[in-house]
Image: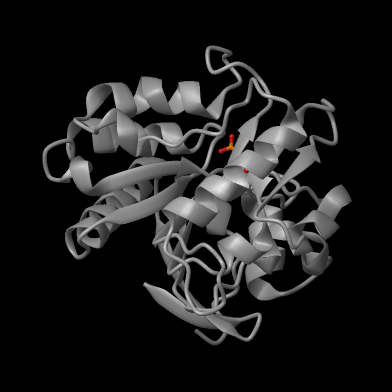
Amino acid sequence: MLTRDNTKKRMQLHIYDTKQQVAEAFSKYLTEFIASRPAVHMALSGGSTPKIVFDKLATDYATSIDWKKVHLYWGDERCVAPTDDDSNYKMTVEHLISKIDIPEENIHRIKGESDPQEEAQRYGKVLQSKLPNGANKIPQFDLVILGMGDDGHTASIFPHEIDLWHSDANCTVAIHPDSGQKRVSITGKIINNSEAVAFLVTGESKTEKVQEIINKTGDFEQYPASLVAPESENLHWFLDAAAAKGITSGKV
Ligand SMILES: O=C(O)[C@H](O)[C@@H](O)[C@H](O)[C@H](O)COP(=O)(O)O
């Protein structure tokens, strides 16, 4: 494991040869993380990368984790019905929730079928009421799991709307730059207030942005993923060799 200082905050890099090894390593990390706490409130990422991790958790780790003490939230959701193939909730049900013994009341989905602005407000209140909040009164996740898009977006904060990261709101409405699809997303104040943050990033298409963000080169400051710097300094990047290819050995 490499450790390096970046954006004035420390981060831990976990680099493995294959996507499968990333899934195994993250599943081990999550199992230990959950075992060490009486309850865990964690936000899941969407997209395709989590599928291999959720499949691993739902098979090899289904009984190693006490899912009754785990509360699942989402870092973002597409504004579609929960039955839509684009729904992050649907993907999570298919690859994880339908295969583990987790109480229904522990699932706190973003309602993609609702009016986006109303849902962003509602979900922001859910976080405020269900998550512990520290002295700063900001809801605090135990763990936020994030992916990163090829353009350096994370959750659903995209480069063309990077100001949404700095919103005072807990949740915001974003628009996908290509499809125009609306999304509900948690904001930077929530992500950086989390006790721990773990990126799951794999594949050649992520190499360039990972390189710029970790090495702090190029236009890294324009990528929302570069703004992830939790106050806790408990930031982990789980990467396969393809995504990590451009990381200079540098000072670690
Ligand atoms: O709703 C989403 O799409 C995600 O939450 C988003 O932030 C995702 O993590 C990245 O776009 C990476 O997606 P892939 O894993 O599909 O590359």
Which residue is depicted at the point 55% across and 73% down? 230
Which color scheme is applied? one colour
Q: Could you tell me if residue 128 is visible in this image?
A: yes
In this rendering, the answer to whether 245 lies above or below 124 is below
Report whether 160 appears left or right of 36.
right
Is 13 rendered above or below residue 186? below
Q: Position of residue 248 (x, y in %)?
A: 60, 74
Q: Is residue 106 left or right of residue 220?
A: left
- Residue 76 lies, in percent from the top left, at 60, 40
Q: Residue at left 54%, top 77%?
A: 249
**Residue at x 25% of width, y 56% of height:** 39
Q: Please name the residue shown 72% across and 66% down the image.
A: 212
User: For the image shown, how many numbered marks are present on the structure?
Assistant: 0
The answer to whether 22 appears left or right of 252 in the picture is left
Q: Nearer the viewer, residue 7 or 127?
A: 127
Q: Quadrant of the N terminus?
A: bottom left
Q: Residue 179's x, y, as percent? A: 82, 25
- Is any part of residue 246 visible from this angle? no
Q: Residue furthest left?
A: 63
Tell me where residue 70 appears, x and y as whole percent: 28, 46
Q: Nearer the viewer, residue 62 or 251?
A: 62
Q: Is residue 220 above or below residue 23?
A: below
Quarter occupied by residue 64: top left
Query: Which quadrant of the picture is home to ligand 1?
Result: top right
State the image quarter where residue 234 is shown. bottom left
Spot the residue most to the right. Answer: 160
